[in-house]
Amino acid sequence: MARSDRSLFVPSGSKVRLPLQVKWLFDTGEKLRGANGCEISIWELRHESDDRVLSDWARHFRGHYCADNKIDILRDGTGHSRSEYLNALKFPDTAVAPGPSIRAGDFAEILIADYVEYLLGFWVPRTRYADKTVRNESTKGSDVIGFKVVSAGRESADDMLLVFEIKAKLSGDSPSGRLQDAVDDSAKDLRRRAESLNAIKQRLVAEGGSHSLGQAKRVARFQDVVARPYKEQFGAAAVISSDVFDRNIIKLTGVGGHPAKGGVQLLVVHGVNLMSLVHELYKRAADEA
């Protein structure tokens, strides 16, 4: 059964305001069985032509690349307006390859980051895109990392680290096997966990200020799983156009080669006209800066 009551997903006692676009992300209730008997959850992004929601989403989107209170400082000396600065130096290119594919990948990662934070109740640092030196390149490391501490003020072996690998296919007409691609890359996350955690912590320390430094300490709690045990989960997600959504292809996905095997969360999110949505979000993010 489709779920439409967003309160079902709000962590108990949470005071975090759910971004408006989260209401467009629906759990269809459909579960597919993949190879090895793994379960695959099917979600749908049902976006609409709603200026208020799209503008709110574009603002949220823009903040991943550049805080609004830093745009004027960063564009100073470039001769660019805010919109020109974002389009020329921060956002992946609209048409020149590999810009569009980077846009699709970044969009998919941000969407799943929202899923992990706002629907699953993890804290997800949003440090991944702001320090890109080449706008048309993907950021290295694990795609989305979520942190959950079960008891404020003390560590517990039940604290949890969730690492998601995400793949996108937002256009085309051939069936997508991107979920298996995500699983295969997720298998590498155990090895690169230390580097990814260090990258997040390093960016937070570089930001400075008591808030960011406090967040860096939250990351530090998860950097030595032997001395300070916690639970670890892995996830693999494919964000794809409904045009390439094929249940038979998706059901070929297997986790036999993943170190966590049965402990991998598998998720497919599909929707119509997703690449058009992506370009609309980037355009609004620049024009409304």
Image (spheres, grey):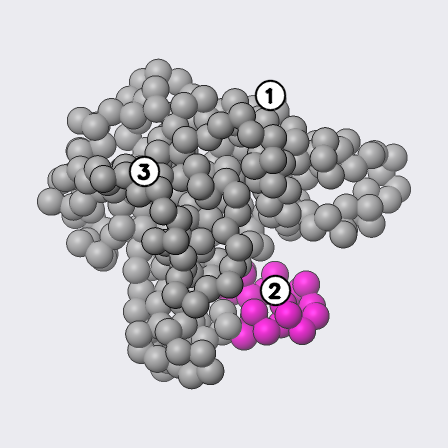
Magenta stretch holds residue 213: yes
Q: Are marks 3 and 2 in contact (CB under 8 Å)?
A: no
Q: Is residue 175 left or right of residue 52?
A: left
| Residue 51 percent location from the top left of the image | 60, 30
The residues bearing labels 2 and 1 have C-alpha atoms spaced at a distance of: 32 Å
Q: Quadrant of the C terminus?
A: top right
Q: Are marks 2 and 1 in contact (CB under 8 Å)?
A: no
Residue at x 18% of width, y 26% of height: 248
Of the residues tagged 3 and 2, which is closer to the observer? 3
The image quadrant that residue 135 belongs to is top right
| Residue 144 percent location from the top left of the image | 44, 52
* Helix, strand or loop at mark 1: loop
**Residue extending furthest toward the left:** 37
The residues bearing labels 3 and 2 have C-alpha atoms spaced at a distance of: 32 Å
Q: Which residue position holds label 3?
A: 43
Q: Which residue position holds label 2?
A: 204
Residue 231 drawn above or below residue 88: below
Give the residue type that dot 3 points to.
Trp
| Residue 205 percent location from the top left of the image | 63, 68
Give the residue type that dot 2 points to.
Leu
Q: Are marks 1 and 3 in contact (CB under 8 Å)?
A: no
N-terminal-most mark, 2 or 1: 1
Give the residue type that dot 1 points to.
Ala
Boundaries of the magenta span: 197-217
Q: Which residue position holds label 1?
A: 95
Q: Is residue 85 left or right of residue 32?
A: right
